[in-house]
Each structure stands twice: as structure tokens, then as C-alpha cells.
Amino acid sequence: MQAGILSLLQDSGRIGQHRIGLTTGGPLDPDAFAWCNRLLQNPAGATVIEASFGGLQVEAQVDTYICVTGALMPLRINKVPKDLWHVHRVKAGDIIALDFAEKGCRSYLGVAGGFQVTPSFGSTATVMREAIGGLNGDKLQAGDSISCSTIENRRQLYLTQNQQPRYRNIATVRVILGYQQAHFSRLQQRLFFSHTYTVSDRCDRMGYRLEGPAISCDIEGLLSEGICYGAIQVPADGQPIVLLNDRQTIGGYPKIGSALSIDAALLAQLKPGGTVRFTPISHYDAHNALHLAASFTRRLPISELQ
Amino acid sequence: MILHTAGENALIAYFGEETSPEVSGRVQAAALAVEAALGDDLIDLVPSYASLLIIYDAMHTDHLSVSARVREAVNHGEHSTAASEGRLVVLPVYYAPESGADLEALASRAKLSVDEVVQLHTGTEYRVYAIGFAPGYAYLGEVDPRIAAPRLATPRTKVPRGAVAIADRQTAVYPAESPGGWNLIGRCPVRMFNPDADPIMPVSVGDRVRFEAVDRKRFLELGGELS
């Protein structure tokens, strides 16, 4: 009915296709995405709508259950405010509306059983730059109809407020030094890790461009090479760019290292003007942090509406 | 091989600092060796000019184990020469001003005739050094220095699918209609990226490519489009 600012169908991403030049796509906030499906008791990678900034309004065409996780984006069903991180019953004809985000900027609207979308290259993830995934490779438009099944029974699971992540206007991003880090002098690295940066207007699914003290390195460019998720690229103007889900698979700018994925996801919840701080960690600590986060998620108790 | 950390679940291996068939061959051989050594722990590989990005499953393995297995596979593994030489793929091209808008300008800047440009472009065997920028966009090198040409000052907003183009000492066939700043010299009727075909791309990184000039009639017979 109303497509919102940027609403995209996403599953967990297109994996293993870099060699033909395809990027991964997928949810900018994988944790909120995973919770959406988990609360709905869906398969882990089921297709949901990622709503950026809000303004989305959809009409249910079947009786089913929905859940919205992620940014603080007020949810209304038939104009009645409803909790986020909570499974709700909807009937055909109900109007589900997501207002503009108050905190964070990416939300996940899922349905029981997931949206049924034909995968391309093994995934339904929409990458607009490649015109692949979703419905015809594009963002959702007013009038689009997305299939999902009638579901009569689902447990109404939810996360209590103190279990839900709190999105703020600031993100501390842990960085694993790597790639061309040796070309950034100790002074430049200290500059990078001791100042705050601001999210610029040029932030999108490809990458978040930051503004702050310029960082220089002793090489200008290099032979194009593979770019992993979270890589922090420093072009000639010295303003770092954290590369995210829709990044190009290869590129020739120097990189100081890569953001820890958990933190890059929080970065992607920031709007322009948000504050970013970087802190270095070893790859051992990064590995540990990933496993702790996974274990925390597994053990978080889920509540059920009786 | 020099191995660096790239990210929480990625390592990058370097095999040299220049663009050459020899370095590309080493990247290719390493890609095969790493794929075999890591098995299910491997998520994806990105081979490029002189490097190989290795992305692994950090929930099932770690940096130390992957580095050790990569070093073992690359330094002590059996290098298949056949693999590092790549396959030879021949791509037909209709070279003409109507199919290559910059062909005449490129020839006059190089002080060559159009025919000489075509001869130099078809007379070189290229190597697929990298695939990226856009789905199916294969960077081929190296173009004869006499017909190397800088990128256009103002990129075109629309370059048709199949356009054959040169930028510096690289050449490529546009896999889809897209913006582009390379010098257009012809059109290739073979689709470089076809989701419905198997394989999706006629070339992979490490393959060799030769271009073969065809006339307008043959180009159209092969399914080429002029628009």
C-alpha cells in the first residue's frame, strides 16, 4: 500500500557467488533478522521485509501471524499500537503500518512461514545495484503483492523489553587490523582509534561513509582485490568507509582492517549524524566475541503469551 | 605467498605485486588447492589479479586452523599446471563504428587504422584477471600498449550489453547494460552473464580469452543486437 523509504525483501544473503561478481546482500542487522524468524518459529533464513527508516504500510491478504524486530519503529495494526519483538495475529484485510524510526533505522517485518519469493542464485536477498533478488531485483513499490501462506496456529512468542537490544546514536566498532594495515603508520592508526567519526549522508547498503579526522597511508591504490564484509576502506580523501552487505566484491582502495560483524550491524542501524568510535581487537578476541554472541542468543529465554 | 588477516572470518593471500599471467596462474592454482583443503569450512573465495580472499565459517573453524591449512595446501600441495593455464575461450566480436562508438577516435589517437586496432585487439591472448564491479564483469589483460586508452573523461550513462571496451591495458565485455567509462570498440554476441545458462558465465578467473573478428551478418546470426 505504501512502500516506505526503502523496503527490501531479504533472506540471510547470497552466499558463495563472489566468483561471478555477486555480492551477498541480506539483512543489515542479522541479529534482529534472526530474532524475527525465531520468534515466528520460522526456518532461520526465511524471507522477511527489511524496512529502512520506516513509512511502510501493508495489507494482510491472508490470516497469519507477523512479527517486527529491529529499530524502534512504531507498529500499528489497524491503527492500534502493538509491541515490537512480539508475534501478533493478523486477519485478511488488516492494515499493518510501520511509522518512521525513532531509534535505529532498520526493521524486519516477518510473517509465519516467511514470504514466498523465487530465489535467484540460491537466495531471495534483494540487491538493487545488481537488479537481483526480491521482486524483479527492486525495492518494494506500492501495489506489490508478496505471497505468504494462511497460518492458523503459532505460539505468540516475544522478547521482554529488557531482552531487546537498545539502539543508540552511537556505535563502538571493534576493528580487526588487517589487509594494508602496515601501510598506515602508528600515528595514523592512533588518530583513527582515538577520535570519533560521524555517519555522513552517504551511507547505504553498500557502505557507511564516515566523516572525521582524515587518515592517510603510504599507498594510493592497489591492484583490485577481494573485499570482505566490514572492510574499512580509506580512499585518497582519508575519510573511512565501512563496507557492508551490498559492497562490490573487489576494489583497489587501501583498507586498514575490518569491522567485527556484530558491530558493523549496529553501525548500519545508525542514521546520518550518528557517532562512531573504533577500537582495535585481535582476531582471537574477534573469534571469541562472535562465539559469545551466538551463545548469548541461543540462551536468551523467550517468553510466550498465554 | 604472503598471508594477511582480512577480517573476523577472512584471510587474504598475495602472490605477487604485478599483473602477469604467471601470478594469475598461481592465484588460480591456490584457489583450487584452498577449496580442496578447506572443504565445508570454506564460505567463498575471491580470486583477483594477484590475491585470493578466503572467507571461512568462523562458527566451525578459526584463523589459526585456516592459516595452517592454507599454507600447507599452497606451499606443499600439488600444483596443477593445466588448471593454472586456464581454458581458452574464443569470443566473436563485430568491430565497427556502429557497434563501437569510440573505435575511430581510439584509432586516430593511436595513429593507427581501424583495421590495425582490430588486428592488435584480436592478436593478443588475454587472461581473465578478476571478476567483479558488477555481476559477470570480467577484467581481461593485457591490451597491446599501442591501443591502450584512458577511461573517458565523462562516463556514458548507458553502455549496451555486449559492448567490447578498453580502459588502460584492460579490456572487457559488458555483461549487462550499465553506465561505463571505457572506450567502446565493438559488440560481442555472447552473453557474459546469463542466469539461465549453465555455466552462467562463459569464463572464470584464470581462463584465457581470444577475440575473433566477425562481420555484421555473422554477428546478427550469432544473436547479436545493434541498438
Image: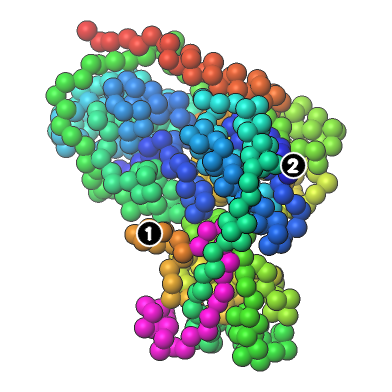
- Does the magenta-highlighted stretch encompass residue B220? yes
Q: Residue at x 49, y 54 (%)?
A: A20
Secondary structure at badge 1 equals loop
Counting residues from the N terminus, which is met first, the one under dot 1 or under dot 2? 2
Residue A185 sits in which quadrant? top right
What is the chain letter for disc 2?
B
Is B172 on the left or on the right of B1, as rendered? left
* Viewer-closest of B197 and B7: B197
Q: From what the image shows, is residue B16 above or below residue A242?
A: below
Q: Residue at x 21, y 20 (%)?
A: A154
Could you give the CA–CA distance between mark 1 and mark 2, rounded to whole angstroms?
35 Å
Q: From what the image shows, is residue A22 above or below residue A167?
A: below
* Viewer-closest of A253 and A274: A253
Q: Residue at x 28, y 46 (%)?
A: A118
Q: Residues within 10 Å of mark 2 (few under 14, many from 20)?
A: few
Q: Residues within 10 Å of mark 1 (few under 14, many from 20)?
A: few
Q: From what the image shows, is residue A282 above or below residue B44?
A: above
Mark 2 residue type: Ile
Q: Which residue is mark 2?
A: B2
What is the chain letter for disc 1?
B
Where is residue B157 shown, x and y percent of the image?
52, 68
Mark 1 residue type: Asp
Q: Residue at x 63, y 80 (%)?
A: B123
Where is residue B5 shown, x and y percent of the image?
68, 35
Is A43 on the left or on the right of B41, as rendered? left
- Does the magenta-highlighted stretch encompass residue A126? no
Q: Which residues are magenta?
A: B203-227
Instruction: Tell me the quarter of the image containing the C terminus of chain A.
Output: top left
Is B90 on the left or on the right of A189, as rendered? left
